[in-house]
Amino acid sequence: MRRLTACLFAATIAGAAFAQPLPADPNRPAEDIARDPARRPAEMLAFAHIGPGMKVVDFIPGHGYFTRMFAAAVKPGGTVVADVPTIAAEHDPAGAAAIGALNATYGNVTVIANLTDPAVRGADVVWTAQNYHDIHNAPPEMLPAVNKAIFNALKPGGYYVIVDHVAAPGAPANVTSTLHRIDPAVVKAEVTAAGFVFDGETKVLANPADDHSKNVFDPAIRGHTDQFAYRCRKPA
């Protein structure tokens, strides 16, 4: 409770009316609701400064846990752009199908396949959860291209929010593929090098009991990994 209160208070003093409960949404599936205690959605919406009337880009949205939440949170007047890259759709066709069906339910979700699509322009927030480490496993030119495209998509003052699994400080680069983790310091350095200003972090997803040497899919830790959440801002 103290963490939630502190997070909401911080959002309020930052000048935004984001200190609100999770939007009511009868369309959320039971399996999403069951994940709420681990994913802390109300705190994360507040941390990302997401509210009515905004445009939010959900980059590589998986099966849409946060996409659904964003679609409800930005009403009235807001939109959500779900970026499902072709390679992600090929790897997880069920996830791509789930995302493709969301607009029929919410009426404000557009699905694209590339961050250069004009639909992303003028975004208030670009969000990606548990994906940044995977971009490190793509050809080396991919990461700077993604960060540049996100920078260009955001309006001045907009936010880039990254959530991912924590690797031990100074962990070798290959942990992005062997453990599906990444050193948060690496992320911060790369994103600020792309022109963003580091704007804050939240510890609501931290788990100091996590064994950082384990693969995130290990049954002993799956769903309870130590995660970082960074908010970075495009200069106004």
Image (tube, helix red, strand yellow):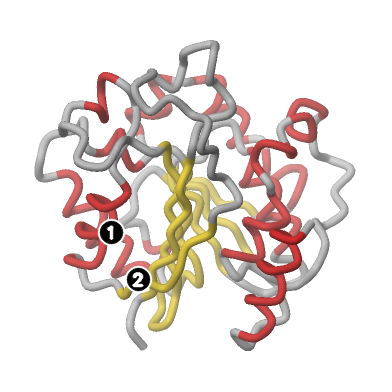
Mark 2, residue position: 198
Q: Earlier in the sequence, mark 2 or mark 1?
A: 1
- Where residue 218 appears, as percent x and y from the top left, is 47, 13
Residue at 65% x, 60% y: name it.
45
User: Residue 42 in the image: x percent, y percent?
Assistant: 73, 55
Q: Quadrant of residue 148?
A: bottom left
**Residue drawn 26% across the image and 42% down it:** 169
Instruction: Please report contact status of discs 2 and 1: CB closer than 8 Å, yes or no.
Output: yes
In the structure shown, which secondary structural element does the residue marked by tag 2 occupy?
Answer: strand
| Residue nearest the observer in this picture, 55 or 128 | 128
Rendered position, 93 above or below 17: above
Q: Outermost residue, top direction?
A: 219
Is 44 left or right of 178, judged from the image as shown?
Answer: right
Disc number placed over residue 188 in the picture, else none: 1
Q: Is residue 119 visible?
A: no
Q: Which residue shows up at 62% across the image and 56% down it?
A: 44
Q: Quadrant of residue 122?
A: bottom left
Residue at 63% x, 76% y: name it: 10
Mark 1 residue element: helix
- Residue type at mark 2: give it: Phe
Q: Which mark is residue 126?
A: none
Please say if 197 is above or below 46. below
